[in-house]
Image: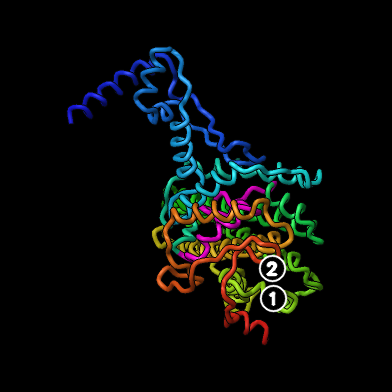
């Protein structure tokens, strides 16, 4: 107890001396990995926070020499804490899992020699937009209803996918939307020599942009609701409610487009013919299932994908639209649903809940589709030193436990088993025993 007390007194004394020489608000940039990839993750940590993570002996030496350079341990600890807080979130959003894969991914050598000039321009633009989108969420904190997707609670099966996907499509966040490093994904597609690489890159570009826009729009919807509750008073309708209606309409457009483009991405991955010519969602699904190799649907995440892109998702979105466009009565996204309604009745929160739920399902479907793309890319272009890569990914996964992996959209009904990894040529990177097609998928085929 005395030793601990004395150490704390010494820490406090050194902190006061440090404050006399440095400004705690200055920012220290933390770069991860030996050779960070373009578009990689960096952390900006206030100098005062960085100093607080320094061990006592380093503080003492820095004050005596009148020269402070952050130690490696402080850089790593403060940087990881910054990523957890500002980017990846908690366990419900795969936060610790994504930190491990980010650190592993940034410690590898990633060439970008296969990118075209157009790929580089698109990747650079997306990465800049990603920075702006993250700034929107940086000071957001928490809300009720929650804005984060909490995919680990909704569908535990997805948690195991972030590790093997790091070899081709490295995810960096699934907190508010699915975010990945576009330059690495584009490079993986080009290097694999996929015959439809142009189409795959285009859909990856569109889907990431849609994810970013959807996440930011949902944040705006919540902000407008907060402003409306504070300022509505006796007004029958406010500008905040008007903008919420417009924002919701835009979100429905984004959510529908995300579902459609996920299907089109899979069509490009498996070289399905005639998919673009199909006019209805149901007919596109049937063409996709008919034109895709059976082995592609033999994984747990493929089962999940077929559930998420089911035609019922489109019907649910349609019911939020104007009654003039759909047969099921009047939509809630019309002025009379908001006019003279007390904010405490939560009409906007009911709409938000449906939009957010669909965004969560779309995001789960997209992750599953990206996993299927990873399988295809690994078959075409296995990672170098596959045995070492396999061992490292297994080691990373062991840190998160040995829980069973399920495919249901609920944390209470886990089924299935752990993933099997194999990076030999011609074998899926993520493999499970073949399963029967889901009821929803079978119904779409029969229909």
Q: Residue at x 55, y 56 (%)?
A: 162
User: For residue 117, which numbered disc appears in the image?
Assistant: none
Whether 157 is among the magenta residues is: yes
Q: x%, y% of residue 142?
A: 42, 49
* Along the viewing direction, whichever of 267 and 138 lies nearer the viewer: 267
| Dot 1 alpha-carbon crowd within 10 angstroms: few under 14, some 14 to 19, many 20 or more | many
Where residue 6 sits: x, y (%)? 22, 24
Q: Is residue 17 above or below residue 45?
A: above
Looking at this view, is 201 or 96 the one in front?
96
Q: How many marks?
A: 2
**Which portion, as a residue range, is magenta?**
154-183
> Residue 221: x and y, percent?
53, 54
Q: Quadrant of residue 423?
A: bottom right
Q: Which residue is mark 1?
A: 285
Q: Is the residue under label 2 in contact with that under label 1 (CB below 8 Å)?
A: yes
Left or right of 336? Residue 184 is right
Within 10 Å of disc 2 (Cα), the crowding (few <14, some 14-19, many 20+) is many
In the picture, measured across the screen, residue 194 lies left or right of residue 129, that is right
What mark, if any, has residue 263 been given in the picture? 2
Q: Where is the N terminus found, in terms of image quarters? A: top left
Please tell me whether residue 123 is drawn above or below residue 446 in the rendered image.
above
Is residue 189 positioned above or below 291 on the image? above
Magenta stretch holds residue 150 = no
- The disc, 1 or 2, on the residue closer to the chain's N-terminal end is 2
| Residue 211 image position (x, y, % from top left) | 61, 55
For image coordinates 48% across by 36% down, the residue present is 79
Nearer the observer, 184 or 222: 184
**Colour mode of the rendering:** rainbow
Q: Tell me the SS state at disc 2.
A: helix
Classify residue 155 as left or right of residue 367.
left
Q: What distance separates the C-alpha of mark 1 from that of mark 2?
A: 7 Å
Dot 1: element: helix
């Amino acid at each position: 107890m005395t030793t601990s007390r004395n150490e704390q007194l010494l820490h406090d004394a050194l902190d006061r001396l440090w404050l006399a020489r440095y400004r705690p608000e200055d920012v220290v940039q933390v770069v991860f990995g030996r050779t960070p990839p373009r578009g990689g993750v960096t952390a900006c940590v206030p100098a005062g926070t960085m100093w607080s993570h320094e061990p006592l002996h380093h503080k003492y030496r820095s004050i005596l020499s009148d020269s402070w350079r952050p130690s490696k341990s402080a850089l790593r600890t403060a940087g990881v804490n910054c990523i957890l807080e500002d980017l990846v979130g908690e366990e419900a959003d795969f936060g610790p899992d994504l930190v491990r894969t980010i650190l592993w991914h940034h410690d590898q050598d990633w060439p970008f020699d296969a990118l075209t000039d157009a790929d580089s321009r698109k990747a650079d633009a997306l990465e800049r937009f990603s920075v702006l989108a993250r700034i929107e969420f940086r000071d957001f904190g928490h809300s009720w209803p929650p804005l984060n997707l909490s995919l680990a609670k909704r569908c535990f099966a997805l948690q195991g996918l972030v590790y093997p996907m790091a070899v081709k499509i490295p995810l960096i966040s699934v907190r508010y939307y699915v975010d990945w490093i576009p330059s690495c994904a584009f490079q993986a597609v080009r290097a694999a020599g996929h015959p439809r690489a142009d189409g795959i890159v285009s859909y990856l570009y569109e889907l990431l942009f849609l994810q970013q826009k959807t996440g930011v729009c949902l944040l705006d919807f919540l902000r407008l609701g907060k402003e409306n509750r504070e300022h509505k008073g006796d007004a029958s309708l406010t500008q905040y409610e008007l903008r919420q209606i417009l924002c919701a309409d835009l979100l429905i457009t984004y959510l529908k487009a995300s579902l459609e483009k996920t299907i089109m991405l899979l069509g490009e991955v498996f070289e399905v013919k005639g998919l673009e010519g199909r006019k209805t969602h149901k007919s596109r699904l049937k063409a996709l299932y008919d034109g895709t190799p059976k082995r592609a649907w033999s994984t747990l995440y493929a089962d999940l994908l077929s559930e998420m892109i089911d035609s019922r998702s489109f019907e649910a979105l349609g019911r939020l639209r104007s009654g003039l466009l759909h047969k099921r009565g009047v939509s809630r996204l019309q002025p009379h649903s908001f006019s003279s309604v007390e904010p405490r009745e939560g009409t906007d929160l009911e709409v938000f809940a449906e939009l957010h739920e669909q965004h969560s399902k779309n995001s789960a479907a997209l992750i599953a589709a990206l996993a299927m793309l990873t399988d295809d890319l690994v078959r075409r272009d296995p990672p170098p030193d596959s045995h070492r890569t396999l061992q490292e990914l297994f080691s990373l996964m062991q840190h998160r436990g040995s829980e069973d992996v399920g495919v249901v959209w609920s944390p209470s009904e886990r089924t299935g088993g752990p993933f099997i990894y194999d990076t030999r040529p011609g074998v899926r990177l993520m493999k499970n025993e073949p399963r029967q097609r889901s009821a929803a998928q079978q119904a779409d085929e029969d229909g």
